[in-house]
Image (cartoon, grey):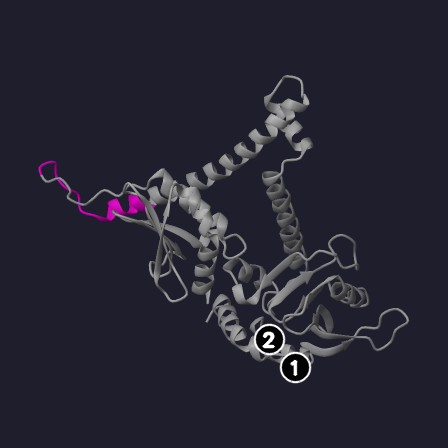
Amino acid sequence: MDFIDRLKTLSSSAHARVPHTRTEEATKTALVMPFLQVLGYDVFDPREVVPEYVADVGLKRGEKVDYAVLKDGKPIIIIECKGVGSTLDLAKVTQLFRYFTSTSARFGILTDGMIYRFFSDLEEPNKMDEVPFLEFDLSEITNEDAQNLKRFTKDSFDLEDSIAAAENLKYTEAIKRVLGDLLARPTQDFVRFIMDHVHGGLKTKARVEKFTGLTKHAFREFINDRINDRLQSALNSERDDDDASEPETSADEPSTKPRIVTTEEELQAHTIVKALLQGVVAEDRVHLQDRQHYCNIVLDGRPHKNIVRLRFNGPTKRISIRNEDNEDVTHTVDSPEGIGAHSEAIRARVKTLLK
């Protein structure tokens, strides 16, 4: 069983344990210790994992952090645990912050057993950052989460490599948040920057307001075009493979195989569904599978993991989404944008498939 499979097995078992986990100690035993075991650490060997690790803070002696993961006798990760369902607010971060500065660890984890927030000292040496560089929910673990976590396994951990990866992850996510904010609400400075490159006239208030709308529209179209180009390239590649694997037909014996054409509206629907699932599952796990009379959007390329079925070929556009009873519920939409009205059902469907 590889690392991602072990994580998903833990995710499934953790989800079942949560209703019976009512105290902080139970959280440690039922959720946090199994997580450390999946990372490859022996939680019963004090040479690797020390519970109640003493982290003297200033004049305070005997202050203890819940766990310290050791390498060569020195802490590399300290972990502060709270009861499952606890709010991991600023006060809890401050507590971990104090412990962090008093040890040689470069990584700190704040967790309630299901939500894990990873911190480091990327901004200032030996001073824990206020913002985590990695955060995930164990009940909704993704392949991307697994790849990020793999660096912290016992067999793969390398301090310099992990620090570099943490820095890349933190600032990449920060840049994506900034771009997301600019996409939704372009600032005047950003709009003026765009105007400097495309508009030679005066930047009057009216012109800036007009270009604000144009910038939002162009930004969205740019992203959709890039996604559609990559998708179309992948589809063309798959079709080329299919064509290569089939016997050729002569001019006197034309092929009777129905031609499947993926329409622009189906590609647009795929883009919209991926956008609706942000924060639930990585977009590269959401695939389009076209058929002659309908089109499926599925998880991980598996036909039995259907998220949405599109029927856009007829005069009436319809989509079908399975509910919690595994029954198809059909809705009529005027256009692909109408899928957005059913975002909750789509997100619920994917969460069910992930379980």
| Rendered location of residue 57, percent (x, y) | 85, 70
Q: What element carries label 1?
A: loop
- Give whichever of discs 1 and 2 has the lower sequence position: 2
Q: What span is in magenta?
A: 238-252
Callout 2 secondary element = helix
Q: Which amino acid does label 2 sit on?
A: Leu
Q: Position of residue 317 (x, y in %)?
A: 33, 44
Residue 52's quadrant in the figure? bottom right
Q: In this view, does 43 lie above or below 234?
A: below
In this picture, residue 270 sits left or right of residue 251: right
Q: Are marks 1 and 2 in contact (CB under 8 Å)?
A: no
Residue 31's tag is 2
Q: Depth check: 151 or 345 in front?
A: 345
- Residue 4: percent from left, percent from top: 50, 66
Residue 129 forms part of the magenta stretch: no
Q: Residue 45 carries which label?
A: 1
Point 62% across, 60% down: residue: 135
